[in-house]
Image (cartoon, helix red, strand yellow):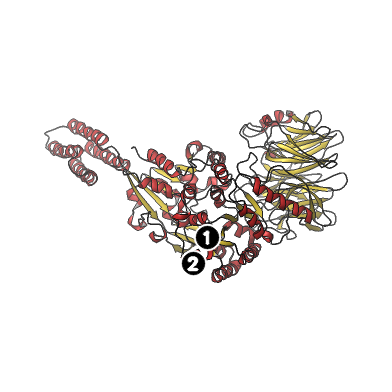
Amino acid sequence: MRKHQQQQILEVLQTIQMAQAEGLYADCQDGALGVGEYIESIEGEGTKTVALLEDYCELLFKASNGQVGENALKKHLIKIENSVKSELKPNRIEIAFLSYNASMSDSIESIYLAAKEDPDCDVYWIPIPFYDKNPDGSFGTMHYEGADCYGDYIECTDFRDYDIDSRHPDVIFTFSPYDTGNHVTSVHPDYYCSRLRGLTDLLVYVPYFVAVDNVSEHFCTVAGCVYAHKVIVQSEKIRQTYIRVFRKEYGDKLGKPEDKFVALGSPKFDKVINTRREDCELPDEWRKIIGDKKVILYNTSVGSILRGNEQYLIKQRHVLDTFRNQDDIVLWWRPHPLSEHTYDSMRPKLAGEYHKIVAEYKSEGWGIYDDTADLHRAIAWSDAYFGDWSSLVSMYGTTGKPIVIQSIENTEKKLPIQLWGFTIDDQGLCWGFDLLKDCLYELDFTTDTARIVALSNTMPYVFGKEHLFYHRYIMTHSIGGKIICAPYYLYNYLVYNRKNGEIEEVDIDRNYLMSADSEGFAIAHAVEYDGKVYFFGSNTKAIVVFCNVDNSLDYNTRVFEKIGFYSDDGQYVKHPIYLSSCSEDGKITTIMRGSDKLIRYCLPTQDLEIISSSPVLEQCVCAEFDGKHFWLITNKYDKLVRWDPHSHQTVEYHISLRGNIPDCYSIFSGISDCGDFLLLFPGSGDVLIRFDKGTGHFDEYPDLPTMSSTGVSVYEYEPPKRINDKTYAFARFNYTIYELDRVSGTITPHRFYLDKDSSDTFREGLRKDISRYTGSEIHECFSGDTAEFFADLLHYNNAGLLHRIENQRALITNADGTAGKAIYGFAKKMGGSI
């Protein structure tokens, strides 16, 4: 007897009770007979409950003749209900596992296998149909990956033979989170999470992906998270992100997020950990190709297809050309299962070239092309990973084998650099810190070359270290012969002394973090006055003051203490959205995010003066001042507001242009005043907007490129930086700094490359780190030296392998390959009273 079946019986008895009160004894008898037959179909003959139902039918007959009264019927019906509760206690549970794309089914497989071993559980693995989506969002071709797409150990049930509505399984597991929210595919609407929730006592969503370090926020509010009773995530750290983002979006309206999200690990890790090379069958043709060579798993992702456009196809051809003639390395190319349809649906002009690349690779026969559902065979057989960032990176990390992330744009041996912020010192020299390579550079804007002057002590792309984020210093500031690199989710400043070349890491007092569980300081703004640099951050409750004399730090908290209560949630205001230059007497003007005040603040004395205020300021995330008006972008990213701080008048302009305006963080990264017009730089949006102050019209600005990454939340431009009469904007998608001269209107692109000495230094340092580091290795690779780079990686592959595995598995829950068992035990307890 299942809990749902028992509940159905009790509900029918309640209906019989109401009919009995109305004197509808014939209906009561029909209902009692039906309940008895239903019980016998489940439990067989001879139950006490069925005997009581038979006695009840006799009593009904007597009651219809006036031989017994209403009280006798009531008492007997109570006996039946008690018998149902005591004799027919739930002792079985039914679980439906819904799978649509077989290659993603490892998301729930180990849970299914654990349930299958339980004699008290009725388990159904149900492949369901799914559809390609046409460019207009309508359904295209239907796909159904049935039993022949799964191993013999999975017993598939045809979805047409399982009436999920009437069976009402106790638990439903799904890894399809989007409902209508996916632009590429959709499961059949009958299996949307919004519908499944009403067909079970426990809907469990298990993400089809795992995260490298932390989950992207847009995954935390998908339909699967909204409608599932429980969401299983891989670690407590990931769980906290889900909770924070979900609460920000929904509060407690859909229940407490702490109860919804459960950290029990991921079956995807189980599959990696428990799969051995000798367990995997390999086609004879593939065995001949491999021979005694090392195998590189080449993984390409949908996200890179959408971001890279034509350049990504150039990159893929270059990678294949690089590996084609290698005698000791075999490429095992495994594209994302939706790659072809992504090109056909979302990049149709590029689809023909992609299909041609695939056809040529397959026909040449020197490498392996793997479009099967068996991802884990590829992981087990390969010696290293190469390709795009994806959830596969995190899965592969549990093997301890090397991981190399390809650089999409570059197909040469030149190394382009990524800069967030740079500074110009008192001698006119430029300095910047690379987002990816952990290097401080001297920049030459004449030749567009960069010279490494300092290397950080911690390698980029390293798991298991305290400093987990790979772009750790995002801003630089020059003062008195020193270059200060400010932290991004880190706990120190990096200080480079130009005169003697020395590097010092200056620790920041963690007591000034916004909260005790914060992952580090995030500093993004700096103002210099009287030999000191005042740093403002988004994750600190103090202005951190750096003294150039002795590299000491001080902490100014008064501004936060005075304006902290102005924020909506009563907490400290986060960071400036506008910060003026410093006056001769040490005063700055600022607007802090979440505050409705325009503030004049004295840096040396911490005195604060409120100049003006407006409710619109609380709603804004970007600000620019043109000398008369403030220009503000609201937090919905749909309005540009002109605000006069003297008259308090505001004028709103609705931003309405074609293009991708996704519902995610930072659609616009910043505003730049260019005299008669403003430029609104895209963050995760894909349109760079020109706003004419005179006409109030918005237009696309054609003089600067955009990535046009429809449907993908990836930063395009960092916030623009103004230096004198020029604005500098760094485009992350093509590694280029654009220099806009606001006087002449000219635009000069700068794409910096390391000079030869610095390039050799970086490569040599990276290779040394491969041999000495015992944590999971994740490195950036530029395909011009791919083969040489992999030769070094594979040479050191065995060094510290056990330590690397342990280090990576320390980041996940149930890292011994038992997540599926833990999840099943949890679901059984929650979904059935057994």
Q: Left of 137 or right of it: where is 644? A: right
Residue 605 image position (x, y, % from top left): 81, 28
> Quadrant location of the N terminus?
top left
Dividing the picture into quadrants, the one containing residue 294 is bottom right
Residue at (66% x, 53% y) in the render: 780
Q: Secondary structure at mark 2?
A: helix
Residue at (50% x, 58% y) in the render: 185
Judging by the rendered image, the residue that carries numbered circle 2 is 285
Note whether 373 is above or below 808 in the view shown.
Answer: below
Q: Secondary structure at mark 1?
A: loop
Dividing the picture into quadrants, the one containing residue 160 is bottom left
Residue 653 in view here: no
Residue 556 image position (x, y, % from top left): 75, 29
Q: Which one is in front, 238 or 483?
A: 483
Q: Which one is in front, 785 or 802?
A: 802
- Residue 364's tag is none
Q: Earlier in the sequence, mark 1 or mark 2?
A: 2
- Residue 338's tag is 1
Q: From mark 1 to mark 2, how far is it between C-alphas?
A: 25 Å
Q: Which amino acid, mark 1? A: Leu
Q: Are marks 1 and 2 in contact (CB under 8 Å)?
A: no
Q: Left of 312 or right of it: where is 701? A: right
Residue 345 image position (x, y, % from top left): 55, 63
> Quadrant location of the C terminus?
top left
Q: Left of 797 or right of it: where is 287? A: left
Q: Which one is in front, 94 or 121?
A: 121
Q: Left of 443 or right of it: where is 230? A: left
Note whether 61 is above or below 723 in the view shown.
Answer: above
How packed mark 1 is, by other alpha carbons closer than 10 Å (few <14, some 14-19, many 20 or more), is some
Residue 718 in view here: yes
Residue 795 image position (x, y, % from top left): 62, 53
